Image (spheres, helix red, strand yellow):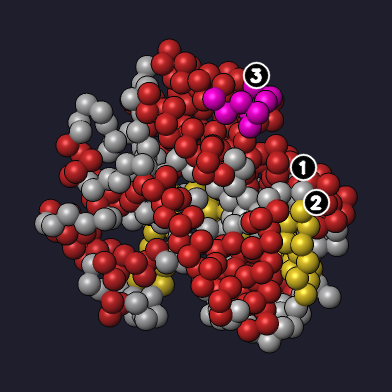
């Protein structure tokens, strides 16, 4: 029996999608689905939900639960695949701290989970935990693949790829919906079928470098014309990325509310009118967390009444990767991997890049892309600088690297002076308290 271990199984909605996909696969459905979490209530709820789903789908697999750090090694023992979806510190208190402390210094964020001061803090809380995972995996499941879904993707995956012996690929769901969402938004649905695309860059800022229709005609000239026209008209929710098309020539993978804070252009206290002009939802992630918590409680209560939960296979990569490695049948993804051998020539070798990857029975094979357009590589580098320095801080436990990561973060550095950045970082570390003990 194959074993698929889900770390952070209390992330019930996500566990349901990924493991539900596995239960829909004839290749994977008879696996042991090992659920691990440090929260007894959340773990119990996930087991209940996934058990109901498994029964609805035919009851092929076996669900086991493992609570707490003392049972972590057993959760991992003999695993073929380990899916990581943990959130260290949860919404309350840590995400609240990540947003509220910077506000005191005049720094506003939208999502705060990938870059910016919120992304830095989240990485520093999370890397020690996944380092423990890696040590356990090297001992009890050394051949397992670690499929990382936790943000900040490039920092966590990059740490695992550089500093552990664990086979790691980072997975996001923005690559597979990128061109489809763009064409639908621009009224070009007739170009969806048979389209060909190339996406490469870094997580949440992978560039849609080429998009051609079924006959090989370049769709970008019309995309650029329509995107500029749409941004000049009525406000809409994707104005930042459409502005990227205008200013940098290319669309990118992750949403405008994310990308609004990955640069120095849009969230500027001296230019408050930009918030309305580009429809930027400040404090979006805390609102989303509250809504998700309330929505999950309602869904859980409904399920307890019906004891039925069906599932249709989603577009998440995880189950397809597992299937491909088990059967050897090839499958292509956009994966986050180390830039070894110059997959993207004008980004550093230590960077975690997002490139097309072929999956087969031997694992994950990243594809060489070559050079990005200079302006796209330059935009990626403003983010990679922060990622590499944050990983350096986590590995060396030197506080100066946290300061440097924050100073070089494009949004933070464009809003605050150096002394204020240092004070804010110290305040965040103090407020996080036991979540960041190594920096006290």
Quote the CA–CA distance across marks 2 and 3: 27 Å
Quote the CA–CA distance across marks 2 and 1: 10 Å
According to the image, label 2 marks what residue?
A: 72
Left or right of 11, for residue 253: left
Q: In this orientation, which residue lies closer to the viewer: 428 or 144?
A: 428
Q: Nearer the viewer, mark 2 or mark 1?
A: 2
Quadrant housing residue 409: top left
Circle on res. 203? none
Main secondary-structure element of the magenta-colored stretch:
helix
Magenta-tinted stretch: 431-440
Q: In this orientation, which residue lies closer to the viewer: 142 or 224?
A: 142
Q: Residue furthest front?
A: 305
Left or right of 204, for residue 319: right
Q: In this orientation, which residue lies closer to the viewer: 352 or 232?
A: 232
Residue drawn 43% across the image and 34% down it:
99
Q: Position of residue 148 (x, y in %)?
A: 63, 54
Q: Position of residue 413 (x, y in %)?
A: 39, 25
Q: Are marks 2 and 1 in contact (CB under 8 Å)?
A: yes
- Magenta residue check for 261: no
Name which of mark 2 and mark 3 comes first in the sequence.
Answer: 2
According to the image, label 3 marks what residue?
A: 440
Left or right of 215, for residue 355: right
Quote the CA–CA distance across marks 1 and 3: 20 Å
Left or right of 91, for residue 49: right
According to the image, label 1 marks what residue?
A: 132
Numbered disc 3: secondary structure: loop
Q: Nearer the viewer, mark 1 or mark 3?
A: 3
Q: Position of residue 414 (x, y in %)?
A: 34, 26
């Amino acid at each position: 029996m194959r074993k698929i271990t889900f770390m952070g199984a209390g992330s019930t909605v996500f566990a349901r999608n990924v493991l539900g996909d596995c239960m829909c696969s004839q290749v994977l459905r008879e696996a042991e689905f090992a659920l691990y979490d440090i929260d007894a209530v959340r773990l119990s709820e996930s087991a209940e939900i996934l058990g109901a789903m498994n029964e609805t789908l035919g009851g092929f697999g076996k669900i086991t639960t493992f609570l707490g750090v003392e049972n972590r090694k057993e959760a991992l023992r003999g695993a073929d695949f380990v899916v990581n979806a943990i959130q260290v510190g949860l919404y309350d208190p840590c995400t609240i701290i990540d947003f509220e402390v910077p506000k005191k210094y005049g720094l506003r964020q939208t999502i705060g989970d990938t870059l910016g001061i919120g992304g830095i803090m989240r990485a520093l809380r999370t890397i020690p935990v996944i380092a423990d995972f890696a040590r356990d995996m090297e001992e009890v499941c050394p051949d397992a693949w670690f499929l990382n879904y936790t943000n900040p993707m490039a920092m966590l995956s990059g740490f695992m790829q550089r500093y552990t012996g664990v086979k790691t690929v980072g997975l996001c769901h923005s690559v597979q919906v990128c061109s489809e969402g763009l064409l639908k938004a621009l009224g070009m649905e007739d170009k969806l079928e048979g389209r060909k695309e190339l996406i490469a860059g870094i997580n949440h800022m992978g560039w849609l470098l080429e998009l051609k229709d079924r006959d090989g005609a370049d769709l970008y000239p019309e995309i650029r014309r329509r995107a500029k026209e749409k941004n000049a008209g009525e406000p809409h929710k994707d104005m930042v990325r459409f502005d990227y098309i205008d200013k940098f020539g290319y669309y990118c993978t992750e949403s405008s509310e994310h990308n609004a804070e990955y640069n120095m252009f849009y969230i500027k206290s001296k230019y408050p009118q930009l918030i309305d002009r580009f429809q930027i939802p400040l404090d979006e992630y805390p609102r989303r967390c509250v809504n998700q918590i309330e929505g999950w409680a309602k869904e859980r209560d409904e399920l307890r009444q019906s004891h039925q939960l069906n599932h249709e296979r989603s577009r998440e990569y995880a189950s397809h990767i597992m299937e491909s490695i088990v059967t050897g049948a090839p499958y292509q993804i956009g994966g986050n991997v180390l830039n070894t051998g110059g997959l993207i020539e004008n980004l550093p070798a230590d960077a975690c890049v997002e490139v097309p990857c072929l999956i087969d029975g031997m694992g994950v094979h990243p594809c060489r892309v070559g050079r990005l357009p200079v302006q796209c590589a330059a935009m990626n580098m403003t983010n990679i600088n922060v990622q590499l320095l944050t990983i350096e801080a986590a590995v060396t436990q030197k506080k100066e690297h946290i300061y440097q990561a924050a100073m070089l973060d494009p949004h933070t550095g464009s809003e605050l002076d150096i002394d204020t950045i240092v004070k804010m970082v110290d305040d965040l570390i103090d407020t996080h308290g036991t979540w960041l003990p190594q920096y006290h």
